[in-house]
């Protein structure tokens, strides 16, 4: 089975992630009883290099979901990077971030079709707080194409969007990051906890997202690309 190494910056932690095929433990922890704590003060993040994986080169339909607990919120005009596979140059694929837009907190997702520009960006205004777990999930389908965003298992209507949803996503060669993006300023790093992050190579249905929210410790293995339990 292909094995990926996910690296924790500024620490000696390393662990292995099995893509596609893995065995669930006979005893599983309840949701959020164990997680990883990403400290912005230490510029920490998790990442996996492009050369170490193929499943995260998401050019077609896919879904990214996980639990996030903020320890601080972004300053006005700033982002907190949740999950990305982009840089500030010509290697942009997809991203999910939290942002403070002039005092309005919101989540953003976006995609590039050419690697250089953001073809489409979607915004959902949501007043999230610290010390609270949120299950965040977006799905992208090449049928349409369409994008859906979920908070705590419920579909949300985007507040606004710019551009046109691309029919395919650029395959960038930068690492997949949790908590920052390649060559970014540490001022945009995520500050908080992450748990049960999953990536699927298909657009989950609303029912599947709801089930994942309700039972995060036993995700469906159908179209499952990657799972990071952070236990």
Image (cartoon, rainbow, N blue to C red):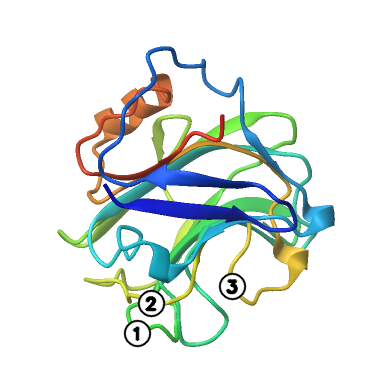
Alpha carbons under labels 2 and 3: distance apart: 19 Å
Instruction: Return the mark for residue 119.
Output: 2
Q: Residue furthest top?
A: 27
Q: Residues within 10 Å of mark 1 (few under 14, many from 20)?
A: some
Residue drawn at 23 percent across, 37 percent down: 205
Q: Is residue 139 visible?
A: no
Task: For the residues labelled 2 and 1, say whether their Cβ atoms are less than 8 Å apart.
Answer: yes
Q: Nearer the viewer, residue 41 or 72?
A: 41
Say left or right for 211 vs 68: left
Give coordinates of residue 213: x percent, y percent. 42, 26
> Of discs 2 and 1, which sits in the foreground?
1
Q: Nearer the viewer, residue 174 or 110?
A: 174
Secondary structure found at label 2: loop
Residue drawn at 21 percent across, 62 percent down: 145
Q: Does 25 appear above or below 140?
A: above
Say left or right for 136 vs 54: right
Give coordinates of residue 40: x percent, y percent. 78, 54
Mark 1 lies on residue: 114
Say left or right for 61 vs 45: left
Q: Does 32 appear above or below 19?
A: above
């Amino acid at each position: 089975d292909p094995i990926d190494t996910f690296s924790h910056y500024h620490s000696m932690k390393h662990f292995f992630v099995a893509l596609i095929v893995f065995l669930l433990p006979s005893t599983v922890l309840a949701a959020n009883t164990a997680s990883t704590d990403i400290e912005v003060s230490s510029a920490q993040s998790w990442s996996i290099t492009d050369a170490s994986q193929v499943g995260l080169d998401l050019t077609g339909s896919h879904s990214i979901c996980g639990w996030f607990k903020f320890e601080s919120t972004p300053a006005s005009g700033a982002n907190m990077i949740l999950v990305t596979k982009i840089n500030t140059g010509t290697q942009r694929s997809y991203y999910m971030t939290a942002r403070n837009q002039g005092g309005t907190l919101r989540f953003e997702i976006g995609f590039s079709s050419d690697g250089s520009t953001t073809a489409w960006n979607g915004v959902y205004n949501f007043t999230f707080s610290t010390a609270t777990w949120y299950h965040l999930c977006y799905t992208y389908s090449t049928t349409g194409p369409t994008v859906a965003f979920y908070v705590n298992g419920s579909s949300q209507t985007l507040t606004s969007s710019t551009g046109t949803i691309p029919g395919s996503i650029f395959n960038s060669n930068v690492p997949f990051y949790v908590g920052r993006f390649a060559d970014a300023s540490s001022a945009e790093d995520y500050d908080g906890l992450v748990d049960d992050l999953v990536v699927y190579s298909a657009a989950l249905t609303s029912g599947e997202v709801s089930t994942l929210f309700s039972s995060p410790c036993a995700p469906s293995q159908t179209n499952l690309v990657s799972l990071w339990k952070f236990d």
